[in-house]
Image (cartoon, rainbow, N blue to C red):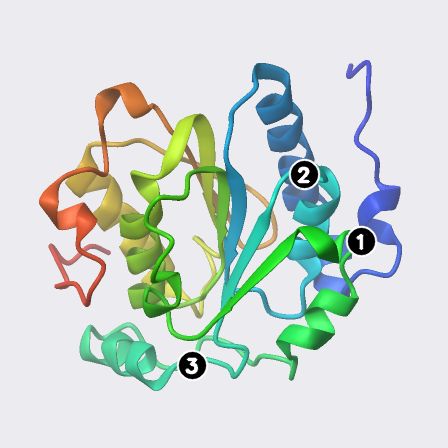
Amino acid sequence: GMTRPIDNRVFLVDRPWRTSTNMVRCALLELCSREIHRIGVPGDIAEVGVGEGGTASLLNHHFADRNLLLFDTFTGFDARDLTRNEELGLGGVPYSLSPSSAERVVETLPRPENVELHPGWFPESAAGLQDRSFALVHIDVGLYQPTYAALRWFFGRVNHRGYVLVADYEHDSAIGVGRAVRQHAEETGTAYVVIPDLSGTAVFAVDSRRQVGRSPASRSIGRSGPGPRQA
C-alpha cells in the first residue's frame, strides 16, 4: 500500500459538494503534484474553467509554491462556444452553472496571493501570456471549442513531464469534450489515459522531447475547424 496516504481532509472540508465527493479526481491532483515536485518540473499551474473554485482551491493548496492562473468568463458559457457546439451536432448547454464571480472564487482559495485572474473568452483571455510555461493545466469547460482551444494553446507551453488534465471526458451531456481530446491527440500524435472519476478525466503526460503541439496549427489559437468527425 501507499506509505504516504492521500490526505482526504484537504477536499472534505469546506469544498463544493461535487468536488468533495469526486475523490478519484482529488487524489489524482494530489499525486500529480507529488510527482511534479518530486522530479522538479518547472512552471506555473493553470485552470481553464473555474466554476465555483473547488478544483482551483485544491490546485492552490497542492502547489503552494506556484502561480495559479485562472481562466474563465465568470459569466457562464460563451455564446460563441455554444454556437460552435451546435454547428458540430454536439448539443447545447451541457449542464447548469452556479452563479459565481472572480472575486468570490478568490475569497475561497487558501493562498489567494498566488492567483492570477484572466477573465474573458479563451483564448483571447490568454493574450500577453505567450512566454509563460506550465507544470500542470486543468481544463474543465464542458464544450468542444474551448476544450480544443485550450489544448492547442497550452500543449507546447507545458514543460517536460508536466500534465494536462481534461475533465468531463465521459460526461454524457458534454460529448464535445471527448471529441476535442481525441482530435487533439490524433493531430499531435500524443497519447492519453482516462481516469475513472465521476465523469472521466483525460490525462496527457507531456513529453516535450517529441516537440508535440508546436506545429503551425497548434500555435494558432483562433477558431478551429471540426476535424475528422469521431464518435
Q: Amino acid at mark 1?
A: Pro
Q: Amino acid at mark 2?
A: Phe
Q: Is residue 107 left or right of residue 148?
A: right
Image quadrant assignment for residue 174 = bottom left
- Do we see residue 195 in this rendering? no
Q: Which residue is mark 2?
A: 63
Tag 2 secondary structure: loop
Callout 1 touching callout 2 (CB < 8 Å): no
Task: Please identify, in this view, whether the residue under mark 3 or under mark 1 is nearer the observer.
Answer: 1
Whether residue 223 is situated above or below residue 162 in the rendered picture: below
Q: Tell me how far mark 1 sits from mark 2, CA to CA.
A: 11 Å
Task: Report the quarter where the N terminus lies.
Answer: top right
Q: Amino acid at mark 3?
A: Val
- Ranked by sequence position, the earlier of labels 3 and 1 is 3
Q: Tell me how far mark 3 sits from mark 1, CA to CA.
A: 31 Å
Callout 3 touching callout 2 (CB < 8 Å): no
Tag 1 secondary structure: loop
Q: Position of residue 54 (x, y in %)?
A: 70, 60
Callout 3 touching callout 1 (CB < 8 Å): no
Q: Position of residue 92 (x, y in %)?
A: 36, 81
Q: Position of residue 8 (x, y in %)?
A: 84, 40
Q: Which residue is mark 3?
A: 93
Whether residue 91 is situated above or below residue 213 in the rendered picture: below
Comparing 136 with 169, the one in front is 136
Comparing 44 with 228, the one in front is 44
As drawn, the label of residue 51 is none
As drawn, the label of residue 110 is 1
Q: Is residue 45 left or right of residue 37?
A: left
Picture residue at 45% right of the left edge, 65% below the top:
141
Picture residue at 69% right of the left edge, 48% below the top:
60
- Ranked by sequence position, the earlier of labels 3 and 2 is 2
